[in-house]
Amino acid sequence: MEIAVSYLKSKYTPEETIEKIEKSQADFIHMDLMDGIFVKKKNDDLNYHMNLVRKAIKPLDIHLMMNDPKEAIEILAKIKPKLISIHIEIASVEENLNVIRDLKIETGLAINPETKIEKLQPFLSKIDQVLVMSVHPGEGGQAFLEEVIPKLVWLKNYREENHLHYKIAIDGGINDQTIQKVKSYVDVAISGSYICMNEDFDKQIALLK
């Protein structure tokens, strides 16, 4: 299982947090960007976030909580992210996936806790990762929602039955307790405050792995 670290909620400055993630055993830096429309919170100053990670060596995994992410995708391509995830709940899913593909970036689809997993089905043969939200998106530090576990089971079974290759990722409320409930089904765990509110990032990452 790989670990992606979100830097939004940390006991350190964003710059210090990125530096500590870079020095850690994390597999990815996870960037959460919100437009204030798809979710209430807004933090879509792209230049600010791009400057934070511009010199980063670790691969970058970007999660766009945006109703209309096309322009952001085209701008973020400049920092050469490994993967960009958009939400299945937005209106223009196929169009935005094509924009990501055309920029030679891996494609991800995120799904909110209340959204039926079957909504993803038409896209699963065409994407690189499914990001299952185990909290309601937009705020860090929420408690893990166990009702999303059947989504993970479904995704793993569907992948095997149909010989597909997408990764399954989980994001929200991930700590050393909740990871035990999902580790049989996921390839990537995204964690923020559990790692970044502590001094020793590698200790927290090791507890997750």
Image (cartoon, rainbow, N blue to C red):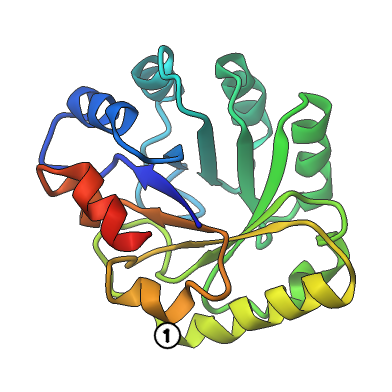
User: In this image, 61 relative to 118: left or right?
Assistant: left
Which sits in the foreground, 120 or 138?
A: 120
User: Do we see residue 140 in this rendering?
Assistant: no
Q: Which residue is depicted at the point 88% across and 66% down?
A: 163
User: In this image, 200 relative to 168: left or right?
Assistant: left
Q: How many marks?
A: 1
The percent coordinates of residue 185 (x first, y second) are 58, 73
Q: Which residue is depicted at the point 52% across and 45% down?
A: 63
Q: Which residue is depicted at the point 33% across and 61% down?
A: 208
User: In this image, 57 relative to 116: left or right?
Assistant: left
| Vertical placement of residue 124 versus 79, above or below | below
Q: Quadrant of the C terminus?
A: bottom left
The percent coordinates of residue 203 (x first, y second) are 20, 50
User: Do we see residue 2 in this rendering?
Assistant: yes
The amino acid type of the residue labelled 1 equals Glu
Q: Which residue is depicted at the point 56% across and 66% down?
A: 186
Quarter of the figure with residue 73: top right
Quarter of the figure with residue 95: top right
User: In this image, 70 relative to 158: left or right?
Assistant: left
Question: In the rendered image, which residue does mark 1 sit on?
Answer: 146
